[in-house]
Structures are given as C-alpha cells and as structure tokens.
Image (cartoon, rainbow, N blue to C red):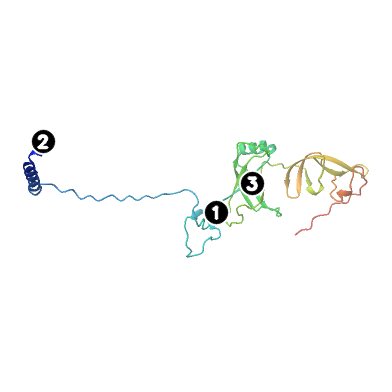
Amino acid sequence: MVGFFIQRPILASAIAAILVLAGAICFFLLPVSQFPEITPPQVVVTANYPGASAQVVADTGRNQAAKGALVGPATGPLSTLVELDPVYVSFSPSESELAEIVGARAAGKIEAEISLAGRPDPLRKGELTFLDNVVDKTTGTIAARVTIDNADFALLPAQYVRVRLHIKDEPDALMAPQAALGSSQMRKHVFVVGPGDKAEMRVVTLGPTDGDLVSVVKGLGEGDRIIVGNLQKIAPGAPVKPLPSREQPKL
C-alpha cells in the first residue's frame, strides 16, 4: 500500500488535500460543546505551633535588631520570649532523702518554700510537681521540680534560690542553734555543759533546719545546756562558765 502512493505522488497529494479540506469543513459544521468554565480552588494553609505565646510569656528580652533594620535568615534571633508565670524551680535532693519525699508525696501534695540567698524568709510558696524516676548514679541525686506562681516576676530564669519542702510536722522536735554545730571526722557534734561545769562533746544526728535552728534527732536531751560561744577555745573537759541566755531584742 505504501508503495502504491509512492509511485503515484500526485494522487497521494490530492487525497491528503481532500482529507484536510474535509477536516476543516467538519470543524465548522459539526456541533462541538465548549469546555465548562472551571474556577480553580484556592487552598489556604494555616499552622498552629504549640509553644511560647505572648499571652503567657509576658516579658521579652533585649532586642537584637534596631527598628527598621534589614533582617533575614542569617540575622539570628531578634528577641527572646521567656515564661515568667508560673516559673519552675529545679533542684536535686539526695537519694537518702528520697524515701521521705516519696512517702510524703503518696500521702498528698508537698508544699515548698522558696527563698533567696541571704534572705531566710520565704519569698514564694509552691508545690512539688515533678520527681524523676531514676537516680543519677554519678551524683547520687534525683531531679525534682517545684512550680511557683510568679505574678510580679520577682523570680527570673537561671536565678539561684533555696528550696524547702514541707515533708511532715514534728511538733516535739528538739531544736539547737546551727552556730553551735561543729564537725569532726565526718560527724557533727555540739558541746554541752556537763557535770562540774566542764565541756562535754556530744555527737548528734541532725534533721531538717528552720532558719537559724536545726532539729536534733539523736545526741541531745531536753534540758541540755548547749555552748554557742567561743567554740574554737572549747575542748572536752575544759572548764566553762555558763551564762544565762539573753533574750533577742524585739524589732
């Protein structure tokens, strides 16, 4: 068939012209429906990233770029948002204290008092909200966290504070001045006035502190007279002259 048209080029050209003419006539005469008008959809993508929000952060750090400055991906952070209310105080109690903390937490919430260095009065009160489930084998401590309301922003991130947990009440605890404590061979001791007004050393086991006082679990008894002055000159058996304690002046 191909050879037939090759040998008759005039006939092939005529047939091709007829087909083109027939196609053109059909294009104008035959009904052809138009494509419907289609409006492409508009897709709007919104994203919500959990994290810092200006409604809860309440404070920003120093501006890293002046107003009107040209910024871009290589500029770095423009400012720092920090959450100040509430704040979280992280600390690490020792594993020897873990049993008491866990027991008190099982009985109910554990209240905490936060104070600043050099200021014994508590600045804030909060609650123990986190206690890790593993002890750090290198330090023998466990990570813990207290949540504190900080509406006036008195506490700032990375600030050093003191944490005091309310584990239990001991209404009959025997308290002694911390200024009377001494150390010897990894033990704590105090000097008391013994028979014949001579100094006697007592090895003591200590409990929680309360301001300038510390509870003595073992080693002292009610009525013992504790020596609190000139401790560097005191030795066991040294004669002492006890003086009555003076009342603290009222402010």
Q: Which residue is mark 1?
A: 82
Crowd around label 1: few <14 · some 14–19 · many ≥20 (10 Å) = some
Task: Choose mark 2 or mark 3, whichever is in front.
Answer: 2
x%, y% of residue 32? 12, 46
User: Depth check: 52 or 108 in front?
Assistant: 52
Mark 1 in CB contact with mark 3 (< 8 angstroms): no
User: Depth check: 26 or 98 in front?
Assistant: 26
Q: Earlier in the sequence, mark 1 or mark 3?
A: 1
x%, y% of residue 166? 66, 44
x%, y% of residue 3? 11, 35
x%, y% of residue 226? 84, 46
Q: Is residue 213 left or right of residue 114?
A: right
Q: Which residue is mark 3?
A: 112
**Image vertical order of residue 230 relative to residue 4, above or below:** below
Residue 11, quarter of picture: top left
Q: Secondary structure at mark 2?
A: helix
Q: Does residue 126 appear in the picture of this structure?
A: yes
**Image vertical order of residue 134 relative to residue 225, above or below:** above
Q: Secondary structure at mark 3?
A: strand
Residue 10, quarter of picture: top left
